[in-house]
Amino acid sequence: MLIIEGIVMSFILLLICVVGISNGPVGLVIFYEQEVKDRVIELGLTTKEKIKKTWIITLIAIFVPQIVLPPAMVYGINGVEGFLDGFIQILVILMIAGFFDRLFIDWWWVGHTKAWVIPGTEDLMPYIYGKTLVKKWLGTIIGFPILAALLAGAMQLIM
């Protein structure tokens, strides 16, 4: 069941990305390095205000499901009652989605297809590198266990 729930979370993330770039990759320029954002603004493809608005909407679209759905699945569907079992199950779900994001979306889709290439920024590729890549992996490997512990702890207070 956990694998299916992790796939559901991965699908939600994929859906957010598909909708975000449905009118072109500029739609999710928020995920690119600052020099790409600056170039896209210079090229007149977007504005700082649009980027800020997209950032807020996208963060809500990504984090609300990450905060609400895993505990709902684990405690509601799977019937878990304790902290440790809840933590482990939430962590498994989040890690499946996190590895899907790092490997399928970041490495393959962004790094090896043309779907995320913004014309006029090709010289700034690869779009995910260095510090950003490290931050994303640390967010998955360290951030998700912390989030899982917080969510399992919150569920213990609620229940």
Image: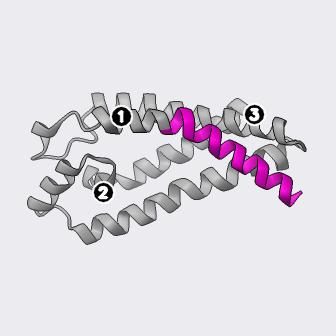
Q: Which one is in front, 92 or 132?
A: 132
Q: Disc count in the image? A: 3
Percent position of residue 57, x then y: 44, 65
SS of the residue at dot 1?
helix
Q: Which one is in front, 49 or 15?
A: 49
Q: Are marks 2 and 3 in contact (CB under 8 Å)?
A: no
Q: Quadrant of the N terminus?
A: top right
**Cα separation between marks 1 and 2:** 20 Å
Q: In the image as oriented, which residue stretches furthest toward the bottom?
A: 49
Percent position of residue 108, x then y: 36, 28
Query: Of the residues tagged 2 and 3, which is closer to the observer?
Result: 3
Q: Is residue 18 above or below residue 92?
A: below
Q: Is residue 33 above or below residue 42?
A: above
What residue type is disc 3 on? Answer: Ile
In magenta, the rendered stretch is 139-159
Q: Is residue 67 above or below residue 104?
A: below
**Which image quadrant is residue 40 in?**
bottom left
Q: Which residue is mark 1?
A: 133
Decide which of tag 2 and tag 3 comes sooner along the chain. Answer: 2
Decide which of tag 1 and tag 2 comes sooner along the chain. Answer: 2
- The answer to whether residue 47 is visible is yes
Q: Main secondary structure of the magenta part?
A: helix
Is 11 one of the magenta-colored residues?
no
Q: Which residue is mark 3?
A: 88
SS of the residue at dot 3?
helix
Residue at image x 13%, y 44%?
121
**Cα separation between marks 2 and 3:** 35 Å
SS of the residue at dot 2?
helix
Q: Residues within 10 Å of mark 3 (few under 14, many from 20)?
A: some
Q: Residues within 10 Å of mark 1 (few under 14, many from 20)?
A: some
Q: Is residue 113 above or below residue 12?
A: above
Percent position of residue 157, x then y: 84, 57
